[in-house]
Image: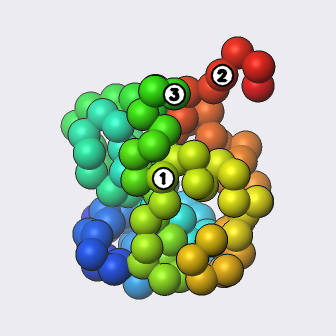
């Protein structure tokens, strides 16, 4: 069931989302990152929630827009630029809470990959 959670100043959409942005698909204590989707500008708990709720296909953030704040920490509610997130070693630079390191396996679903990756 779709619902929304207000985390900091952001409304995050998802399926069975909680107050830290965990959803039906990702529920571990480390799954506390939400992503603003490039295609629509809406915040979702994960790519699967976007696929189930949005009426369009997801698009990845282009490298030229990696300075955009498009990642939300569900621990402190602060946003990170894509560059900050990709360089943070799975730890929020604001509150030091740990993110799921396995999320790096899904970066290609959200962020354009450089040719050197």
Circles 3 and 2: CB distance less than 8 Å? yes
Q: Is residue 10 above or below residue 53?
A: below
Closer to the N terminus: mark 3 or mark 2? 3
Category of crowding for the residue at label 3, using alpha-carbon neighbours closer than 10 angstroms: few (below 14), some (14–19), many (at least 20):
few
Q: CA distance from mark 3 to mark 1?
A: 12 Å
Return the residue at label 3: 63
Residue visible at 76% across and 25% down? 117
Category of crowding for the residue at label 1, using alpha-carbon neighbours closer than 10 angstroms: few (below 14), some (14–19), many (at least 20):
some
Labelled disc at residue 114: 2
Category of crowding for the residue at label 2, using alpha-carbon neighbours closer than 10 angstroms: few (below 14), some (14–19), many (at least 20):
few
The secondary structure type at the circle numbered 3 is helix
Q: CA distance from mark 1 to mark 2?
A: 17 Å
Q: Is residue 47 left or right of residue 88?
A: left
Q: Which image quarter: residue 111?
A: top right
Residue 31 spot, x, y in % from top left: 61, 69
Labelled disc at residue 81: 1
Closer to the N terminus: mark 1 or mark 2? 1
The secondary structure type at the circle numbered 2 is loop
Q: Is residue 85 left or right of residue 35?
A: right
Residue 98 spot, x, y in % from top left: 71, 75
Q: CA distance from mark 3 to mark 2?
A: 7 Å
Q: Which image quarter: residue 88?
A: bottom right
Residue visible at 40% across and 29% down? 59
């Amino acid at each position: 069931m779709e619902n929304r959670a207000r985390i900091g100043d952001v409304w995050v959409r998802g399926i069975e989302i909680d107050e830290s942005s965990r959803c039906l698909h990702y529920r571990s204590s480390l799954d506390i990152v939400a992503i603003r989707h490039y295609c629509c500008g809406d915040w979702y708990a994960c790519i699967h929630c976007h696929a189930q709720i949005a009426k369009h296909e997801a698009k990845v953030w282009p490298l030229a827009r990696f300075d955009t704040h498009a990642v939300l920490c569900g621990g402190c509610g602060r946003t990170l630029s894509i560059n900050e997130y990709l360089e943070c070693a799975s730890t929020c630079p604001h509150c030091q809470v740990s993110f799921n390191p396995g999320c790096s396996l899904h970066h290609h679903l959200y962020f354009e990959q450089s040719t050197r990756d």
